[in-house]
Image (spheres, rainbow, N blue to C red):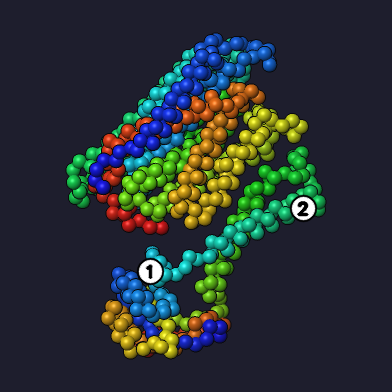
Amino acid sequence: MNQQFELPSSYKKWTWGLIIAGLLALVYGIIVMQPFAPVAHHAAEGAQDYSGTRFWAVLLQNSVFWLLVVNASMFFICVTTMAMGGWQVALRRVPEAISSVVPTLGIITFLVLMGIIWGGRTDIYIWLDKDLVQHDHILKGKSGFLNPTFFTIWSAISIIMWWLLGRKMRSLSLESDKNGQMDYATAKKWIFKNTVWASLYCVFFGLSVASTIPWLWLMSIDAHWFSTMFSWYTFASSFVSGMSLVALFIIFLKNRGQLEYVTEEHLHDVGKFMFAFSVFWTYLWFSQYMLIWYSNQPEETKYFIERIGTADKSGPYHGLFFLNLILNFLCPLLILMKRGVKRNWSAVTFMAVLIIFGHWIDFYQMVMPGTMKEHAEMMPFEFGIGALFVGIIMWGVGKYLTKHPLLMKNHPFIKESMIHHT
Amino acid sequence: MAGGIKKFVVGSFEDEAVLFPAVKNVRKAGYKIHDVYTPFPVHGLDHAMGLRETSLHTAGFIFAATGTTTALSCISWIFTKDWPLNIGGKPHFAIPAWIPITFELTVLFSAVGMVLTFCYLCQLSPFVKKHHFHARATDDLFVMAIECTEKTNEAELINFLEKSGAQEVNVQMAETGWWIGRYDREQKLYREELGY
C-alpha cells in the first residue's frame, strides 16, 4: 500500500485523447471562425457573422467554468480546515490534486479573457465599446468598475491569489509527510497555521468568487442587467460541480485499490454535499428568478426574456433553460435523496457526471444568450473545447496523484477520518 | 394495555464502553434484547443491536409529498376557480408565486408528520405512560432489557449479564406497550423505589 500510485494506461489514453480532440477543435476554431479578425461594428441584424463570437464565447464559458470548478476544491479544503473537520482527511489529497490544476487553468483563462478584452471583442463584453459607453447612461455609471484596466488587474490578482494561497495550503499538507507523527504541540501549531492560511483563502474567495469575479467575467456580458444573487448562484454552481469532481476522482482511485481508509461513509458525506448544494443552487436560482418575475422591471426581466422568451414568443434558450432546472435540481433532489444512493459507488458516479454536465449547461446559458443571441450552437466544437479542459484537468490531477502519497498519514485528525461513520 | 405483560431480565451498565461489548455478547449468546435505554443518543448502538433501518424518512417523504400536493392543488383551485384575483397583472395560474408557500407547506407537513410518527413509533404521548425499567436510564445509567421466553434460564442469564459488566441485574414483570396514565400522579419518587 505504501508504494506510489501509478496511473493506468487507460487513464493516460483518455487524457491525451481528450486533449488531442480538444486541440483539434481549437485549431478548427482558429482556422474556420477567424477569432482574431476585427469585430464588425453595428452590422445589420442577420447579416452579422457570429463565428468569431462563437469561438470566444465557447472559450470563455469553458475556461471560466472549469477554473471555478477546480478552484472550488481548494475552497472545500479550506472550509473543512477552518471548521476543524476530521472526516475528510483520508480523502484530502484528492481535492488537493484537483486544486493543483488552478495555475494551469488560471493562465489559460487569463489568456482567454485578455484575448477578449484587448482584442476589443465588443460582441462578448459590450462595455468594451467606448463610444457606446459614452452615450449610455447605465454603462457610463458602471464604467468605474467595468473597464479594461480594472478588469485585467483584478482578474490577474484573483488568479494569482488563488494560485499562491492554494499552493501554501498544499505545501503545508505535503510538509506534514516528511516528519513522522506530530506530537501535541507541533500538531497544534500545524493546525493553527493551516487554519490561518485557510481563513485567508476564504476571505479572498469571498472577495473574488463569491462577489466580484462572476460580476466581471460573466454578469458583465449582459452589462445593463444586474442581480445581487448572481455571484452566489455562480459559486453554488461551481461548488456543487467541484464536489462532484472530487467524488469522481475518489471513486476512480478507490477502483484502483487506493485510498484504503475511504469508505462509503466518506462517499456518503461527499454525496450529501452534492445533494445539499444542488438544493442550495436551486434556492439561489429561484430567488433570482422569482424576484425579477414578481417586480417585473423591464431592465431586469430582459435577462430572462433573452432566455425563456415571453408568453407570445418562445425564446431560443427555452428548452435549455428548463433542462438546466431538471438536470441540476430535479435529478439530484429525487435521485440523491435516499441514503442508499449516496452510499452506492455507481449511482454517485452517474450523478456526479450528470451534475457536472448540468452545470456546464448552466454556464452555457449564462454566456451564450448575451453573446450569440439566437445563433448559439451545441456542436462538436462546443464539446471539443469542453473535452480539452477535461483533458487538462485529468492531466494535472494525474500528475499530482502520481507524485505525492495519497494519504496524509501524519495529519493529527487522521484517526477521526479512519473511524468516521455517519 | 397494549403489548401485554412479559418477563424481563434487566441489566444496568455504567459506561457505554462496557455496554457495547455486552450488547454484542448478549446477541451472540442468542438472547433477545427488548431494548436498550440510554441517557443520551449513543452513536452506532442501533447498528450494534442489529436494528433495521428506520422507515421514519420514508414517512417523511410521504408527508412532504402530501404537503406539496395540498399546497399546489389548493392554491391553484383558489386562484383560478374559486376566487381569481388580479395581482399586479400576473396570470392567475402563476407558479413562481406559489413556490414559497408550496415549499413551506412541504416542510410543515413533513416536520409535523415526522414528529408525530416518531412519537407514535416510540410510544410517546401526553397522558400516556410506559414502563421504566430503571429510573436512572434518564440520568446516567445504560439499561438493557432482555426478554425472557419459556426457554430462557433466568439464573444463567443474570450470571451472564453480571459477567458482562452489569452493575445491577434484576428480573421484572413489565407491560411492553403504552397505556393511558400520568407519570406525575402515579410515579413513585426514585428514593422510594426498591433498592435505593
Name the residue carrying label 1: B48
In the image, A65: left or right of A329?
left
What residue is rendered at 30% in x and 69% in y? B17
Of helix, strand and loop, which one carries label 1?
helix
Check disc 2 and give the amino acid type. Trp
Is A1 drawn above or below residue B36 in the view shown? above
What is the distance, in whole Å, between disc 1 and disc 2 at their CAs? Answer: 51 Å
Residue A161 in sight from this viewpoint: no
Q: Nearer the viewer, residue A237 or A349?
A: A349
Give x and y (percent) for residue A56.
52, 20
Check disc 1 and give the amino acid type. Ala
Name the residue carrying label 2: B77
Is B148 drawn above or below residue B97 in the view shown? below
Is A367 drawn above or below residue B18 in the view shown? above
Residue A313 in sight from this viewpoint: yes
Of helix, strand and loop, which one carries label 2?
helix
Give x and y (percent) for residue B61.
58, 59
Whichever of labels 1 and 2 marks the residue nearer the N terminus, that label is 1
What residue is rendered at 55% in x and 50% in y? A335
The part of the image, by quadrant, that contains residue A53 is: top right
Give x and y (percent) for residue A140.
57, 18
Q: Residues within 10 Å of mark 1 (few under 14, many from 20)?
A: few
